[in-house]
Image (cartoon, rainbow, N blue to C red):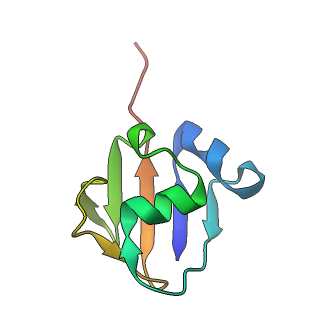
Amino acid sequence: MKVHLWGELGFYGPGKRSTFEFPIDNEMPVAEALRRIGVPAPDVAVLGVNGVAERVDDPAVIVTNRDRIDCYPPTSGG
């Protein structure tokens, strides 16, 4: 699975990289995939799966090794 952790979420990537491949053997809920990667689901404000906005806590959102997920943190600034 291709993963892009935007902004400060890149801290959770392997070697603190923001883009990487994360192999998974079976399909699973996206929340489980994030848990395995080490990204706390509450830190993800916007989730994209293959370019479609999805809810992190929706158990019907299933990912496979062929998917791409993009995780965005809450925005901040002034």
Above/below status of 22 relative to 37:
below
Kindly indicate the quadrant of the structure image that contains residue 17: bottom right
Q: Residue at x 44, y 38 (%)?
A: 43
Q: Quadrant of the C terminus?
A: top left
Question: Relative to residue 72, is residue 1 drawn left or right?
Answer: right
Farthest residue, direction right:
15
Q: What residue occupies the far top of the structure in this picture?
A: 78
Residue in front for this viewpoint, 29 or 18: 29
Residue 66 x/y as whole percent: 46, 86
Which quadrant holds residue 73? top left
Is 1 left or right of 57, judged from the image as shown?
right
Q: Is residue 47 above or below residue 24?
A: above
* Residue depicted at x 44% and y 63%: 32
The residue depicted at 51 percent of the width and 47 percent of the height is 6
Residue 72 percent location from the top left of the image = 42, 45
Total number of numbered labels?
Answer: 0
At which x and y percent is residue 23? Answer: 60, 79
Q: In terms of depth relative to the viewer, which is nearer, 24 or 10?
A: 24
- Rendered location of residue 56, percent (x, y): 31, 54
Asked where in the image residue 69 lies, by quadrant, the reply is bottom left
**Residue 38 position (above or below residue 59):** above
Q: What's the residue at 24%, 54% (across, down)?
A: 55
